[in-house]
Image: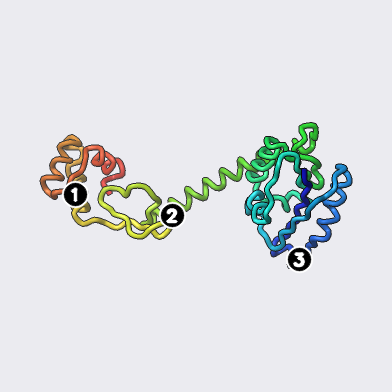
Amino acid sequence: MSVYAYLRVSTDEQVNGTSLNTQRREVEGNALTHNVAIDRFIEDAGVSGHLGFMDRLAANGVTLERGDTVIVSKLDGFSRNSMDTLNVVHAFKRDGIRLIINGHGDVTDEKNIYGQLMLEIMAAFATHERRVIKDRQRTGQSAKKASGGHIGGKPPFGYGVEGSGKDARLVPIDDQQEALKTIKALSGRYSLRIIAWEVGRRHNVKVSHTAIKKVIDRGCR
């Protein structure tokens, strides 16, 4: 069973004079309070708190085992991501690892009511973070789609994909573009299967009636 003290300052915090030595004194005080002796200090200087905590431990060659203890001097030094914090705490509880955060105590101890309150608050923030992430994804996808970008999946009838990843863009396919004009002209006048047959006859383009419906639903564009 090992006791690890984790210290971290970001590049900005280093510029502003935040000291690893100050954090070291804090974790040493927490170790005394909880009657444990620190076996190893892990120092991450100039490392972002948005990186996953377990990834940061792994980068320092640390693999935690049941019975181990991790002490950190402050919550934002541990993680600036609410979801990561909750995931790590739940994993520690499951695996029998203690996590002591300065000011919050042992947050893996069910009897620590203040630590549990902190986790409940973090859970609320994590839910909000997920909403913000999804909203940003929707906004980004809408903006990319509006500018002619391709957000993934099979391209709509009438278009192909040029490029890949974030550079993927929709490009018109000439014969399918002509077929779109025919679909628009026949929409509402004939059944989907007849329109599909007529597109094949006029433009030698094979298209299913379900694809015709998708074209019509999106306004024959």
Q: Is residue 78 left or right of residue 26?
A: left
Label placed on residue 16? 3
Q: Mark 3 belongs to which amino acid?
A: Asn
The residue lying at 85 percent from left, 48 percent from top is: 37
Q: Quadrant of the N terminus?
A: top right
**Viewer-proximal residue among 65 and 134:** 65
Mark 2: give few (<14), some (14-19) or many (20+) Cα within 10 Å.
Answer: few
State whether residue 13 is above or below residue 86.
below
Q: Amino acid at mark 1?
A: Ala
Tag 2 residue = 143
Give the CA distance from mark 1 to mark 3: 63 Å
Q: Secondary structure at mark 1?
A: helix
CA neighbours of label 1 inside 10 A, class few (<14), some (14 to 19), many (20+): many
For this view, does 3 lie left or right of residue 134?
A: right
Q: Earlier in the sequence, mark 2 or mark 3?
A: 3
Q: Position of residue 184 (x, y in %)?
A: 21, 45
The residue closer to the viewer here, 93 or 101, is 93
The residue at the point 64 percent across, 45 percent down is: 84
Q: Are marks 1 and 2 in contact (CB under 8 Å)?
A: no
Q: Residue furthest front?
A: 1
- In the figure, is residue 191 to the left or right of 128? left
Q: What residue is shown at x 70% (from left), y 61% (from top)?
A: 10
Nearest to viewer (mark 2 / mark 3): 3
Residue 158 pos. (x, y %): 25, 51
Measured Cα–Cα span from mark 2 to mark 3: 37 Å
Residue occupied by mark 1: 179
Query: Which comes sooner in the sequence, label 1 or label 3?
Result: 3
Question: From the viewer's perspective, is residue 148 above or below residue 101?
Answer: below
Query: What is the CA distance from the residue labelled 1 to the residue labelled 2?
Result: 27 Å
